[in-house]
Amino acid sequence: MNGANGANGAAGMHVASELRLDLSARALSVSVGDHSATLALGWSRMDSFAWPGEPKAADIECAIDHIEDALQSVATWASAPESASLNADAFDKLVAPHTALLPVNGGTLTREVLESAFRTWAEAAQGSVTAGRVRFGATSQGDAILLLLREIAHHWDIPRLTRRANVES
């Protein structure tokens, strides 16, 4: 445990200063302080894992189970950060085509906005006439990003995600 980040006293969990998420087609890299991990949760992996075309409710539930299992491996040090940021590539792939469903306030998405967009998308997958057919990108990669970010914000208690410039390798 990184003592510099402080402990919240709950079952070995600690409060981190900034959680950095770097999401790509193949992986999700998570880092905070001196902790880091790479999880096999990229948007292409989710697309091929969960739904080859239009997602159905059962596909979404299966994908959620897969994401939750992977997130548990780093939950002790990644949960409840003071702030969280997401690389611009992933942020823009999700937000740019759907500013009406995902209002961004100063480069920030709140957990409430992610939850609302997820509900609309899940209702569409369940055949809701009012939700219609909602896609969060030209392909299903936007759908996968929405699902990943919603699960991350929900399970790690992240109130908001801020867009962060991409780091050149």
Image (cartoon, rainbow, N blue to C red):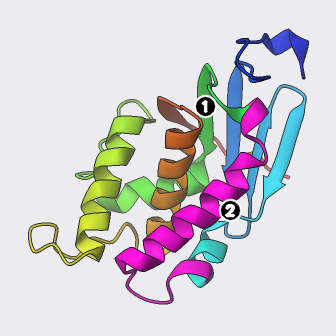
In this view, the residue in front, 90 or 121, is 121
Dominant secondary structure, magenta? helix
In this view, the residue in front, 125 or 8, is 8
Quarter of the image that includes the N terminus: top right
Residue 66 x %, y %? 63, 66
User: Which quadrant of the structure image shows residue 126?
Assistant: bottom left
Q: Give me the disc on residue 24.
A: 2
- Residue 65 is inside the magenta segment: yes
In this view, the residue in front, 161 or 59, is 59
Task: Please name the residue that numbered disc 1 is placed on.
Answer: 84
Q: Is residue 108 left or right of residue 90?
A: left
Circle 1 — which element? strand
Amino acid at circle 1: Ala
Give the residue at x 76% y 33%.
Answer: 76
Q: Which residues are magenta?
A: 49-77
Q: CA distance from mark 2 to mark 1?
A: 17 Å
Give the residue at x 34% y 37%.
Answer: 112
Amino acid at circle 2: Ser
- Residue 7 is inside the magenta segment: no
Circle 2 — which element? loop
Give the residue at x 52% y 36%.
Answer: 161
Residue 83 x %, y %? 60, 24
Residue 4 x %, y %? 86, 10
User: Which quadrant of the structure image shows residue 127?
Assistant: bottom left
Q: How many C-alpha atoms fall within 10 Å of the one at disc 2: few (<14), some, or many (≥20)?
A: some
Relative height, residue 90 to residue 12 (above, below): below
Relative height, residue 108 to residue 15 (above, below): below
Q: Is residue 42 left or right of residue 146?
A: right
In this view, which residue lies farthest toward the bottom?
A: 52
